[in-house]
Image (cartoon, rainbow, N blue to C red):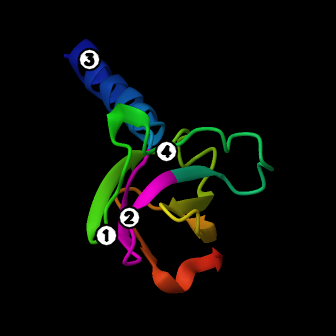
Amino acid sequence: MKKYIFCIILFCVIGGVLSAQQLPRVTIVNNTGFPMNALYIQPSGDGWSNWWINYLDIGGNNLLTTNRSLEVVLPLPLSVADTYDLFFFDTDDDMYVKENVRIRANMRIEFVFDDIVWR
C-alpha cells in the first residue's frame, strides 16, 4: 500500500513538473483588414536573433487573411519566457507590432489596423 501511495504522489509531482514545462499555445487573430504573409514572434529583449522564423510558413500556411485566426505554439515554456514581441507584415509590406505582450496559455492576441507602425 505504501508503494502504491508513493507511486501516486510521484506521478502527480512528475506530471506537475511536465505540465509546467509545456509550450504555450496562443491564437493570433488578424483583424487588420488586410491579408498577412509574415508573422514573427520571439521573447521580448531577445534582440533580432530569432526574427528569421516566419510562423505563417510553418505547416505551409503562407497567408492569414483578415478576420481569420491561427494557433501558434511558442518556442519556450512560460517558466522561461512569458513576455513576447510579435511582428506581422501584410501583403503590402506594412508592419504591425505588439511588444512586451505578457503571455498566458491559450490566450488570443488580436492585431488591428491601429497596430500598424510602418507604411
Amino acid residing under circle 3: Lys
Q: Which residue is mark 4?
A: 74
- In the rendered image, residue 23 lying in the magenta stretch gets the answer no
Distance Cα–Cα, label 3 vs label 2: 60 Å
| Mark linked to residue 35 | 2
Q: Position of residue 57 (x, y in %)?
A: 43, 38
- Measuring 33% from the left and 42% from the top, which residue is drawn there? 61
Amino acid residing under circle 2: Pro
Q: Which residue is mark 3?
A: 2
> How busy is the neighbourhood of tag 1: few (under 14 within 10 Å), some, or many (20 plus)?
some
- Measuring 45% from the left and 61% from the top, which residue is drawn there? 104
Looking at the image, tell me whether mark 3 or mark 4 is earlier in sequence order.
3
Q: Position of residue 29 (x, y in %)?
A: 35, 67
Distance Cα–Cα, label 1 vs label 3: 58 Å
Element at label 1: loop
Looking at the image, tell me whether mark 1 or mark 3 is earlier in sequence order.
3
Q: Nearer the viewer, mark 1 or mark 3?
A: 1
> How busy is the neighbourhood of tag 4: few (under 14 within 10 Å), some, or many (20 plus)?
many
Q: Is residue 34 left or right of residue 69?
A: right
Q: Which residue is mark 1?
A: 66
Q: Give the quarter of the figure containing the N terminus.
A: top left
Amino acid residing under circle 1: Thr
Distance Cα–Cα, label 1 vs label 2: 5 Å
Q: Position of residue 118 (x, y in %)?
A: 67, 74
**96 vs 75: above or below:** below
**52 vs 92: above or below:** above
Looking at the image, tell me whether mark 2 or mark 4 is earlier in sequence order.
2
Amino acid residing under circle 4: Leu
- Range of magenta residues: 24-38
